[in-house]
């Protein structure tokens, strides 16, 4: 039982972050906050991958004398790509928000919807 | 030229014709000439195939495989021959009539009209020649769609509403029920070819036969079996030539033709009568015959009355199919031709009356016989043929139908046929009687003779003569149809 | 040399061409270049399909690293088929954007070169998803296509395009992240990212709960991406407000590729037994797809913006594809896969026609479209044929899909489903006919009176697509034939 709580604490953190991010995306009406929520959500997955790659007792995956247990490097490499994707997503989102603000003079979702109803 | 090449030409002629008509849209005279020429070419092609079919040949050809083992294929057999003859022959007459009607009436969009008309004939020919159920279904839908612009021709609110009813009933029955029946048949039998003796024997059993037959019969919305008949009166918003050829001949006959084909070549007469499912269809047809006749009695608009009369008469043919014996099938199939000539005459007359006097209601038509004697006389002949009085064509088909009912031991339906004839008299005969013997509105002095345009009068006289001729040449039709009854 | 590297070239050519578009800038120049690249890509996919049909499988090891360590590109009948129509429609749609006076005018001149860049990137992404045999690669290409499509949608002329793109971005990112989680969990179980390798190891690994969770994340993520009802809410606005060319391209390809991912994961990686027998995926998919078909079709009937109406119709049509898949039988899969193709042609043609309408009317509102059948006969005739395809009238491609779908239902004695499919096509009759009636038989609206026929450069691609729906409505040996091969491979009837 304790093993599940403390031994797997990485996973608990991942789940907590994931839910937090997801909640922010859904509940917040401010577009910037939504993007931040999205970022937190994605970050949790990055952590998940890195946790998966960790091999107990392993060192950094650099071949050298005296070490024969290495952490799996692949997830870290993968997540580098995913981080790039995340940054790209954020920048596209921010660019869109800038345009939205130019067009609607607001970045609150409610107010945008209200303006759409009027027109 | 080999027969199967001829069959291909029969199919292609109206299609090419439609293209030419569209291309000649700017010059009405050329356009109408093309229409007539296409009609004559088509009819002579069909006639040239007649001796071969009479001699027992079944010209066949395949276009391509649409699905593995399921091609778009054509086979010309007696029933299709009859339908093709009727539709292509009457197309010429209707074209003559349409030229007179459309010009006298200064209709707009005439190119669209003639093009769609030729396309509808293409659909009808495809149905007549179809070698399997999938091909038939394909052309059935082509016919539905190509007639839609004709029904909505006027573009008024009323026309749009009628056309919407038309399309929705026909499409929902065909897509909702007929397609299901076709797919089911394919899954069960592994083939959809029209085969003598049917393809379902031993493949479907018990109540499923009934369900499948119901899907086919009601799914063929063009057969106008109640309660799926509403499209037919709705289609009366179309110009009269359309009502005449399509909604008295090509479209509705395509419907009953499909039912007949399904009964003869998909179910097989023996299998169907042994299953007992056909009794149900007989009652459905019987009810439609009687009910539609009563509704017709109540109509004052001439075209609507004729439309309901058509609904009723179509069920004669369905009844013939449902009897599932030789007499029934021959009588029903023969009625396709006989009713076609009778009803098209009636519609031509209705259109001629409208053109000459702008009258659509029966109550206004008193004394018309004096101003339009030829039209009214033709109407009388058409009416008598539909009723089934000798020496007119309609008497033969009713005779065979009655024989079929007796043969099947269904005396109820002999009675229904007789009652229906009485009802026919009640709703058709008063029109010419009043036309000839009742005096017109008192204030108006006796008008001089004023018939519809010449083209219209020629057309309606031709079909009226056809009604009489068919009485004397019924034997030819009988010989043609004999193989359907199994030899 | 070229022949061996076809699989790589399929992706590399558009990928390298995309940034070059920024350098070219001038409209005619950049268009000519992009179109050339698209047709080249299409040519490659044609050759690929022929190779695959001969040999069954074409494989390529990226950088010479052997699978399962390196990234493998592989084309089997399914992926080659999807590659073919994605690149084909991409090429046809882009061809229409060329000269002056086309649907490209919806995009401000200063941003037009970006359109070409993003378009090629999006194409690269979609092709990449289809061609790769590596799970993580799927995610990367998914994001390439998604990010570029957010940009493409944001290019729309009306300001509503911006919130639509943003909403799509949020939903799409959540979907992609879900897929990423799923892939991570599967890697955890098997230690491989190569699909074929993973499929073998999954059988042995007996992942239990982890497999279940991974499957759940993947299905929901893909569900969002392919707009499976009720995860479709991003789609109608995105399609309605995107530039017409973008809508035509995305509607015809993007959701289809997502359906492809579903097929890949469910059949090639997890296997039919796990997904359908252990988890009962079939029931869920069938329920959702039928619900989606009915709800979306009904909503479509009440739309006044016709692009939006077609977007809802797309949601419904996705339902048909998923319904076919849910049977997990050969005929069902053929129905689903062939509908991928057929619907891509139909919707591509319809949205291209809407592009013509937008160009001339500056509106896609049904009221403004009254009577334009007389002014733009060729455009609206194309629309009408496409509409008939949506309904599933015989001799159009839509009928072929419907025929297989009904057969699949009847073969398994799913009566109700067959009947519901047929009833739902009547809903399509209503929304299609509303437009046909308005366009052809109503008195022209003020805007329609001043309209004239769209230019040939737009009509030609439209009619190529519409003509294809007619062609593949009668000649099915290519479409349904290849779909049949693909279905057999997926179900492992043949190895």
Image (cartoon, rainbow, N blue to C red):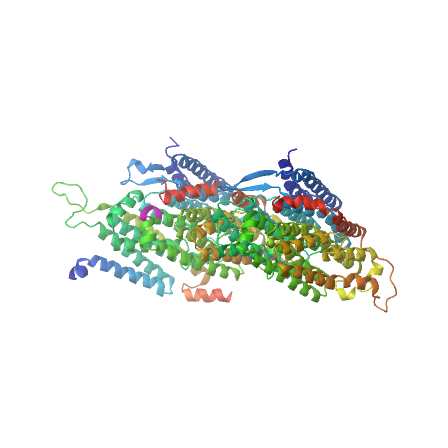
Q: Where is residue C105 in the image (x, y as percent from the top left)?
A: 53, 50
In which image quadrant can residue B51 be found?
top right
Q: In this view, does C324 lie to the left or right of B160?
A: left
Quadrant of the image occupied by residue B430: bottom right
Main SS type for the magenta part? helix
Residue B132 visible, this orientation: yes
Q: Quadrant of the C terminus of chain B?
A: top right
- Answer with left or right where residue A118 lies relative to residue C452: left
Instruction: Using the image as rendered, state which of residue C265 and residue B462 is in the foreground.
Output: B462
Q: Look at the image and give the residue range highlighted in magenta.
A: C267-271
The residue located at (75%, 58%) in the rendering is B350
Query: Which residue of the protein is positioned furthest toward the left in this rendering?
Result: A66
Q: Give the image location of residue C55, x and y in percent.
A: 38, 34
Q: Would you identify the image quadrant in which residue B426 lies?
A: bottom right
- Where the N terminus of chain B falls, by quadrant? top right
Which is more toward the observer, B117 or B385?
Answer: B385
Residue shown at 45% from the left, 62% from the top: A104
Q: Magenta includes C269?
A: yes
Q: Is residue C27 covered in magenta?
A: no
Work out whether residue B159 can be spotted. no
**Relative horizontal placement of residue C23, taking residue B24 as reference (left or right):** left
Query: Foreground: B395 or C57?
Result: B395
In the rendered image, residue C489, in percent from the top left (x then y), is placed at: 37, 42
The residue lying at 69 percent from left, 46 percent from top is: B477
Outermost residue, top side: C1
- B440 sits left or right of C145 in the view: right
The number of callouts visible is 0
Q: Give residue C419's position: percent from left, percent from top.
A: 48, 57
A15, above or below C474, in the image: below
């Amino acid at each position: 039982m304790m093993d599940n709580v403390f031994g797997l604490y990485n996973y608990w953190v991942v789940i907590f972050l994931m839910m937090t991010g997801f909640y922010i995306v859904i509940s917040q009406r401010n577009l910037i906050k939504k993007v931040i929520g999205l970022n937190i959500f994605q970050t949790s997955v990055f952590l998940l991958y890195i946790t998966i790659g960790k091999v107990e007792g392993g060192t950094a995956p650099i071949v050298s004398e005296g070490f024969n247990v290495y952490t799996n490097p692949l997830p870290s490499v993968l997540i580098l790509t995913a981080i790039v994707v995340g940054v790209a997503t954020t920048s596209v989102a921010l660019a869109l928000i800038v345009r939205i603000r130019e067009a609607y003079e607001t970045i609150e979702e409610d107010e945008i919807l209200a303006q759409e109803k009027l027109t | 030229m080999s027969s199967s090449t001829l069959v291909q030409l029969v199919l292609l002629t109206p299609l090419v014709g439609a293209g030419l008509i569209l291309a000649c849209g700017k010059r009405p005279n050329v356009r109408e000439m093309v229409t007539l020429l296409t009609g004559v070419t088509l009819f002579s092609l069909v006639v040239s195939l007649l001796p071969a079919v009479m001699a027992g040949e079944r010209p066949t050809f395949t276009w391509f495989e649409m699905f593995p083992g399921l091609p778009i294929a054509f086979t010309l057999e007696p029933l299709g021959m009859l339908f093709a003859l009727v539709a292509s022959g009457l197309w010429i007459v209707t074209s003559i009539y349409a030229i007179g009607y459309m010009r006298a009436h200064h209709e707009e969009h005439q190119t669209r009209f003639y093009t769609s008309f030729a396309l509808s004939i293409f659909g009808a020919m495809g149905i007549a020649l179809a070698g399997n159920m999938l091909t038939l279904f394909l052309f059935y839908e082509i016919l539905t769609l190509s007639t839609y612009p004709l029904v909505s021709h006027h573009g008024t609110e009323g026309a749009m509403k009628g056309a919407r009813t038309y399309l929705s009933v026909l499409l929902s029955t065909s897509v909702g029920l007929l397609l299901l029946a076709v797919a089911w048949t394919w899954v069960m039998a592994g083939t959809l070819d029209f085969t003598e003796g049917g393809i379902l024997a031993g493949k479907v059993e018990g109540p499923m036969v009934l369900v499948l037959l119901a899907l086919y019969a009601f799914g063929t919305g063009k057969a106008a079996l109640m309660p799926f008949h509403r499209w037919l009166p709705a289609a009366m918003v179309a110009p009269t030539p359309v009502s005449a050829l399509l909604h008295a001949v090509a479209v509705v006959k395509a419907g009953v033709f499909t039912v007949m084909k399904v009964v003869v070549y998909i179910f097989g007469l023996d299998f169907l009568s042994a299953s007992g499912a056909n009794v149900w269809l007989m009652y459905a047809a019987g009810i439609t015959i009687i009910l539609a006749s009563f509704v017709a009695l109540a109509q004052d608009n001439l075209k609507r009355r004729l439309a309901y009369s058509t609904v009723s008469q179509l069920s004669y043919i369905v009844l013939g199919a449902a009897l599932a014996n030789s007499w029934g099938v021959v009588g029903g199939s023969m009625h396709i031709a006989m009713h076609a000539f009778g009803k098209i005459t009636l519609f031509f007359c209705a259109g001629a009356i409208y053109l000459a006097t702008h009258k659509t209601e029966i109550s206004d038509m008193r004394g018309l016989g004096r101003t339009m004697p030829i039209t009214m006389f033709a109407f009388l002949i058409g009416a008598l043929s539909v009723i089934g009085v000798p020496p007119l064509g309609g008497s033969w088909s009713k005779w065979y139908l009655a024989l079929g009912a007796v043969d099947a031991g269904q005396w109820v339906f002999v009675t229904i046929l007789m009652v229906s004839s009485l009802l026919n008299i009640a709703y058709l005969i008063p029109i010419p009687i009043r036309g000839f013997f009742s005096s017109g509105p008192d204030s108006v002095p006796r008008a001089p003779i004023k018939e519809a345009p010449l083209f219209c009068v020629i057309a309606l006289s031709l079909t009226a003569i056809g009604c009489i001729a068919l009485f004397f040449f019924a034997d030819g039709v009988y010989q043609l149809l004999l193989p359907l009854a199994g030899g | 040399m070229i022949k061996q590297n076809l699989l790589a070239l399929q992706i590399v050519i558009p990928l390298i061409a995309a940034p070059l578009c920024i350098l070219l800038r001038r409209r005619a120049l950049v268009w000519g270049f992009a179109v050339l690249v698209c047709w080249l890509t299409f040519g490659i996919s044609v050759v690929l399909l022929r190779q695959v049909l001969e040999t069954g499988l074409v494989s390529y090891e990226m950088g010479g690293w052997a699978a399962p360590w390196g990234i493998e590109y592989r084309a089997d009948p399914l992926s080659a088929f999807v590659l073919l129509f994605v690149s084909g429609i991409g090429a046809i749609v882009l061809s229409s954007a060329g000269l002056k006076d086309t649907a490209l005018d919806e995009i401000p001149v200063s941003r037009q070169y970006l359109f070409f860049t993003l378009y090629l990137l999006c194409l690269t992404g979609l092709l990449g998803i289809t061609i790769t045999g590596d799970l993580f690669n799927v995610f990367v290409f998914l994001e390439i296509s998604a990010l570029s499509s957010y940009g493409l949608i944001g290019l729309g002329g009306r300001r509503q395009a911006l919130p639509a793109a943003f909403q799509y971005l949020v939903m799409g990112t959540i979907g992609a992240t879900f897929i990423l989680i799923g892939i991570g969990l599967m890697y955890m179980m098997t230690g491989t990212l190569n699909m074929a390798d993973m499929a073998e190891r999954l059988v042995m690994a007996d992942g239990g709960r982890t497999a279940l969770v991974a499957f759940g994340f993947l299905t929901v993520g893909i569900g969002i991406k392919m707009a499976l009802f009720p995860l479709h809410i991003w789609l109608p606005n995105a399609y309605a407000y995107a530039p017409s060319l973008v809508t035509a391209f995305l509607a015809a390809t993007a959701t289809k590729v997502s359906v492809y991912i579903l097929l890949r994961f469910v059949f090639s990686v997890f296997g039919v037994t796990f997904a359908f027998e252990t988890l009962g995926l079939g029931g869920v998919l069938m329920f959702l797809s039928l619900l989606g078909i009915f709800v979306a079709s009904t909503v479509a009937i009440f739309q006044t913006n016709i692009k939006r109406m077609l977007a809802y119709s797309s949601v419904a049509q996705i339902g048909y594809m998923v319904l076919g898949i849910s049977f997990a039988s050969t005929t069902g899969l053929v129905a689903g896969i062939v509908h991928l193709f057929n619907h891509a042609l139909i919707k591509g043609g319809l949205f291209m026609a809407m592009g013509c309408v937008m160009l001339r009317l500056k509106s896609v509102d049904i009221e403004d479209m009254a009577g334009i059948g007389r002014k733009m006969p060729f455009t609206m005739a194309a629309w009408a044929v496409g509409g008939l395809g949506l309904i599933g009238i015989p001799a159009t491609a839509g009928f072929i899909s419907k025929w297989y779908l009904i057969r699949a239902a009847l073969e398994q004695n799913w009566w109700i489903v067959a009947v519901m499919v047929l009833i739902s096509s009547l809903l399509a009759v209503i929304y299609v006919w509303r437009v046909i009636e308005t366009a052809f038989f109503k008195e022209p609206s003020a805007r329609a009176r001043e309209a004239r026929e769209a230019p040939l450069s737009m009509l030609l691609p439209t009619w190529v697509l519409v003509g294809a729906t007619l062609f593949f409505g009668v000649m099915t040996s290519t479409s349904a034939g290849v779909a049949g091969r693909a279905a057999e491979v997926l179900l492992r009837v043949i190895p």
